[in-house]
Image: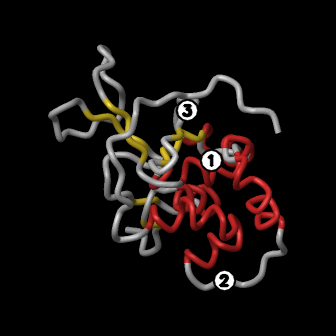
Amino acid sequence: MTKTMILGGGMTGLAAGMASGLPVLEASDFSGGICSSYYMRPNDTHRRSHCPEDGEAYRFEIGGGHWIFGGDPAILRLIRTLTPVKAYQRRSSVYFCKSDRYVPYPLQNHLSYLPEYRTPALQEIARPKTGFVTLQDWQRQYFGDTLCDLFFDPSISSIPPVCKTPSPPRMPTNPPSI
């Protein structure tokens, strides 16, 4: 039996296994780590690797790996050599209860929907980056104080912001001009 092996079949473990030729052990029934997703039917706790034929299921993403790795062509080629890949186009938005407004996600790419915050947010994003220690430090370095105060800090706070029930989503078809 091999005494050296790779533990974890996420992107890093799979790449290490390919590069080293060592066996990769994964605790779950599927590989991919934070880049994986699964399906669940309403009122059912069974995780499915594929959408049922009738389409009656919700798709959940495990973690941030979809946006961490998803835009790099070399990583996408590697993933496709390892496993069948089904790509999805995600349309998501953030609801701001105080202004009853939906803004497409990621926010930093849709600042035209936040005209009152656009200029300071762009100036802060463009600042030179320095060292950081915590996630909050990193967020402030890369997204600026404006977007952190508006979205990131309340999102990671232990006390969720108080909102009334949001109005139905209104996904804009065309962004406002800048």
**Tag of residue 73:** none
Identified at 82% across, 64% down, the residue is: 123
First in sequence, mark 3 or 1: give its number.
3
Q: Position of residue 44 (x, y in %)?
A: 16, 35
Identified at 32% across, 41% down, the residue is: 165
Residue 78, by quadrant, is: top right
Residue extending farthest top: 54
Q: Quadrant of the C terminus?
A: top right
Which residue position is annotated with label 2? 132
Judge the density around disc 1: few (<14), some (14-19), many (≥20) Cα neighbours within 10 Å.
Answer: few
Judge the density around disc 2: few (<14), some (14-19), many (≥20) Cα neighbours within 10 Å.
Answer: few
Identified at 63% across, 51% down, the residue is: 69
Q: Position of residue 20 (x, y in %)?
A: 61, 64
Q: CA distance from mark 3 to mark 2?
A: 31 Å
Which residue position is annotated with label 1? 106
Q: CA distance from mark 3 to mark 1?
A: 10 Å
Q: Amino acid at mark 2?
A: Phe
